[in-house]
Image (cartoon, coloured by chain):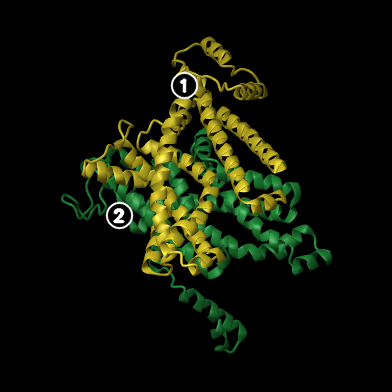
Chain colours: A green, B yellow
Amino acid sequence: MSEAAVARTPSRSALVARWRGFVARRPPWFALLVVVAVLTMAAMPDLLSGHDPNAQTLRARFLPPFWLERGTLVYPLGTDGLGRDILSRIVHGTRVSLLVAMLALLVGGVVGGSLGLISGYARGWIDIVIMRLADSMLAFPMILLAFLLAVTVGASLWTVVIAVALVIWARFARVIRGEVLSLRERNFVKLARIAGCGTLRILWVHILPNVFNTIVVLLTLQLGWVIIVESSLSFLGAGIPPPTPAWGSMIAEGRASLTRAWWVCTMPGVALMLTVLSFNLIGDWLRDVIDPKLRQD
Amino acid sequence: MLMLILSRALQSCVALLVLSVVVFGLSRASGDPVELMVPVDATQEARDVLRHTLGLDRSLAEQYVTFLTGALSGDLGVSIRERRPALDLVFERLSNSAWLALTAMTVALTLAIPLAVAAAVWKGTLIDAFARYIAVLGQSMPTFFVGLVLIIVVSGRWGLLPAGGMESWQSYVLPSITLGWFVVAGMMRLLRSSLLEVLDSEFVKLARIKGVPERVVIWKHALRNALISVVTLGGVYFALLLSTAVIVETVFAWPGLGRLAYDAVRFRDFPVTQAVVLVTAVLVVTINLVVDFLYAWLDPRIRRSQSGGS
């Protein structure tokens, strides 16, 4: 904070101080690298995969990864029971997993965030209803309900998105409500009300920008969890229907050949784990830098 | 205090009612079970008779009222697949899941407590960083993947423990570790931060000044108080365990509630689906209520702040 005096122009100094803040908290370079790789895979899957993810080569069934005996560099991470290239399937699965996760996060974040805004600002019985609803959601085995929903309506991209959004909105609602409760008592909000601002305008212009940081941090922190929920649904067979590769369903398919070819379910699992781990590390770091209020210790 | 109990109990009842509507609606929307039960060449007449005996030809509102009054008197219908009372099926499996949850909780506590104590006592050292990494790692590993890796390595490669089923005590080891590992991260973080808070409080300082040995200060004074935060979240942990049990029980072919729910949903056996979800919900809500009351009863400050509106 004292470094701000070094620079001349105030806007520049604020930026410099902010940048120093980012670097001083030691960004998780490894995690950032993984995320960049994952995003590239999702954006341009054909660039990084040598095979069609659904092409079956029955002569090349259950080939191990290249570092093992019988493995070849043609199929670097091996093949599954239908002779499909695992690396290509992982790369193509990235798009599906990330797309579902981000859409679900968006839906859950917008719904949960809005309900949190309304709940915290309106208070009274609206607040009680929304918060009790959120509490019962948090206390309930939601994966079961999401699974029920996905199976009921039939597996498709949007069912999975809605099912996952159903699991996560409550956390957003809870955190945002807490912030709004204290913001609405601040003077600038009171003055805006006295000046005759409508409720919508107060929420949009005065309160939303102030909870924006929290929303961004929550989004990053939840992304990993959302990817896990999505893959769990796929694993249970309620995700995006086959043959579209998704990490969760790849792991589920690999179960059948667990003793014979361990790599079929382990490789997508490692990809999943690395991705979630990276998002979690980045989320933790962002929280420390942007919004220390959310820090747990 | 009485008002608090009454209002919380009322809220829980409303939550359960809302849930019953959701579950009822979802399971009715999941398609016609009659099609799954009759042979492909069954006549329309035979289908209609079956639909009538199952009560599926009445209006949805009527079906819901029947379902609710039945549920209140402990009758949740008959399993379409097994032709036995759905509630019996649930209670048969309940103990298996409860045992698994219990052993998993034991695993979680035996890992989380020492890690959290070490991280709090040696705050800012390598040990703390190590514990933090364990926590992040724990939150980043999907349960089903942990389970599968354990099966591959421990049962497959080393041939040590059974990969599934529930025959002996050995069958408990892998599922408990998988399920327990899932809550270790959150529990450890929570315990560490509340330990740090307690270690900084006046009474701990006083204890130290009085010359109480550090070992006693940490394990007796501090830990006992810090554990309250974990107990408070007991209900949430329990819900998490039950929810994750669906996955763990599927991976390890464990004959529990989660597995029952999984099968019931897949076979559109909606009396069983409803029974599992409702029994689970009643359990979770009851445990949360009990925890709330215990907490309020133990700590008068909470009692006052809660009655003023949360």
Residue indicated by mark 2: A50
B270 lies above or below B245 = above
Measured as percent of width and height from the top left, residue B143 is found at 40, 46
Residue depicted at 44% across the width and 31% down the height: B95
Please state which amino acid type lies under the numbered disc 2: Gly
User: Percent position (x, y) of residue A50?
Assistant: 30, 54
Q: Nearer the viewer, residue B170 or A171?
A: B170
Q: Which residue is mark 1?
A: B36
SS assignment at label 1:
helix
Residue B61: image x %, image y %?
Answer: 67, 24
Q: Are marks 2 and 1 in contact (CB under 8 Å)?
A: no
Which of the pair A268/B200 is nearer the observer? Answer: B200
**Which of A38/B54 is in front?**
B54
For discs 2 and 1, the disc positioned in front in the rendered view: 1
Q: Is residue A19 above or below residue B85?
A: below
Other residues around mark 1 within 10 Å, as few (<14) / some (14–19) / many (≥20): some
A184 and B23: which one is in front? Answer: A184
